[in-house]
Amino acid sequence: MLAVVTGLLGVAVVIALVGVANTLGLSVLERRRETALLRALGLTRRQVRRTLAIEALLVALVAAVLGTALGVLYGWAGTRALLGTYAAGAVPQLPWLLLTAVVLAAAACGLLASWAPGRRAARTSPVAALAAD
C-alpha cells in the first residue's frame, strides 16, 4: 500500500513540475515585452534567468506549504470522522523530517521547471521583442 501511495506521489510531482513549467512558459510569452525592456535597461541574461527561477521557487514553496498544511488538516479531520470518539484525545503526530524533505524537493522541482522558460526568456533579443507586436 505504501508503494502505491509513493508511486501516486511521484506521478503528482511530475504533473506539478509540468504545470509549473507550463505556467512559467506562458508567463514568459505574456511578459515578453517587459522582459525585453528590462534587458534593454541593463538586466543581464543571467539576471533574467535568476528572476524566473525565484518566481518558480516561490510558486513551488507556497504550493508545497499550503498543500502540506491542507493535507494535515484534512487527514486530521478524516481521522476524527472515521474514528469518532476513539480519536477524541488523539494528537496529530507529524513526520517533520519527511515534510521538510517534501518541501525541499518541491523547491528543487520548481527550480528545475524554471530552466527551459528562463533560457527562452534570456535568449530573446531585446530589440526583436520590443519591435514585435
Image (tube, helix red, strand yellow):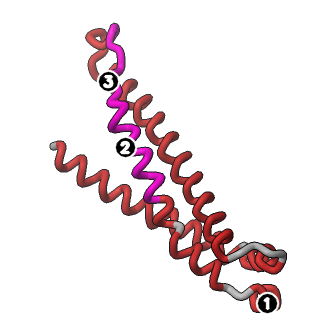
Inter-mark Cα distance, 3 to 2:
24 Å
Q: Using the image as rendered, state which of residue 42 and residue 110 is in the foreground.
A: 42
- Identify the residue shown where x is 62% and y is 59%: 55
- Identify the residue shown where x is 59% and y is 68%: 24
Residue 31, percent across and down?
Answer: 73, 73
Q: Is residue 128 above or below residue 111?
A: below
Mark 3 closeness class: few <14, some 14–19, many ≥20 residues within 10 Å: some
Task: Tell me whether the residue at label 3 lies in contact with that at label 2, contact meaning CB atoms closer than 8 angstroms.
Answer: no
Q: Callout 1, which amino acid?
A: Val
Relative horizontal placement of residue 123, taking residue 36 as reference (left or right): left
Which disc number belongs to residue 101? 2
State the image quarter where residue 127 is shown.
bottom right
Mark 2 lies on a secondary structure that is helix
Mark 3 lies on a secondary structure that is helix
- Identify the residue shown where x is 37% and y is 31%: 96
Q: Callout 3, which amino acid?
A: Thr
Residue identifier under label 1: 127
Residue identifier under label 3: 79
Inter-mark Cα distance, 1 to 3:
59 Å
Labels 3 and 2: the sequence-earlier one: 3
